Amino acid sequence: MRYVKVVWIHDSVDDPMVYLSELGDDGYETRKVQFYWDGRSEWADESFETATIGPSGIPFPLLGEIASQPEFTAQVITPEEFERAWNEAHTDF
């Protein structure tokens, strides 16, 4: 598994600003967490998704591709950081 964090720099309160993804060996998301400006969070995994969040149907892009866009930052994170966010999102549910 790999774990990544993408921050989207924007002003919309309706769109997430932080995305954390757990990626399988095939590059597909297995779990995902999103955080919004107002403190809301959402989560999804292979067995649960909503109209606003779900694992992507395509392999996750290379971090360099994401970070090359000025409105995004992207980095690898630890499994522990992902698990903290996952657990925080579940308490908000």
Image (spheres, helix red, strand yellow):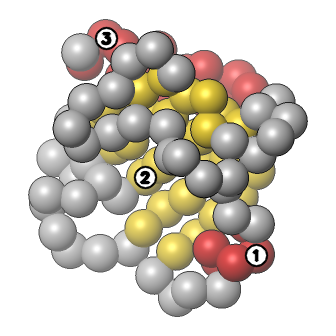
Residue 91 horizontal side relative to residue 24, left or right: left
Q: Nearer the viewer, residue 65 or 10?
A: 65
Residue nearer the viewer, 47 or 44: 47
Could you tell me which quadrant the C terminus lies in?
A: top left
Q: Quadrant of residue 73?
A: bottom right
Which circle, 1 or 3, is nearer the viewer? 1
Q: Provide the secondary structure element on which disc 1 rests.
A: helix
Q: Is residue 28 left or right of residue 16?
A: right
Q: Left or right of 80: which side holds 36? A: left
x, y percent for residue 65: 70, 78
Q: Which residue is mark 2?
A: 18
Distance Cα–Cα, label 1 vs label 3: 32 Å
Residue drawn 69% across and 64% down? 61
Label 2, secondary structure: give it.
strand
**Residue 92 at x, y percent in the picture:** 25, 18
User: Is 62 located above or below residue 21 in the figure?
Assistant: below
- For disc 1, the marked residue is 64
Residue drawn at (38%, 18%) of the image? 48
**Where in the figure is residue 44, as x and y percent of width and height?**
41, 26
Identify residue type, mark 2: Val
Q: Amino acid at mark 1?
A: Gly
Tell which of 57 and 48 is nearer to you: 57
Q: Nearer the viewer, residue 68 or 25?
A: 25
Find residue 55 and report its horizontal and vertical position in percent: 49, 38
Label disc, if present, on residue 91 of the rendered structure: 3
- The residue depicted at 76 percent of the width and 66 percent of the height is 62
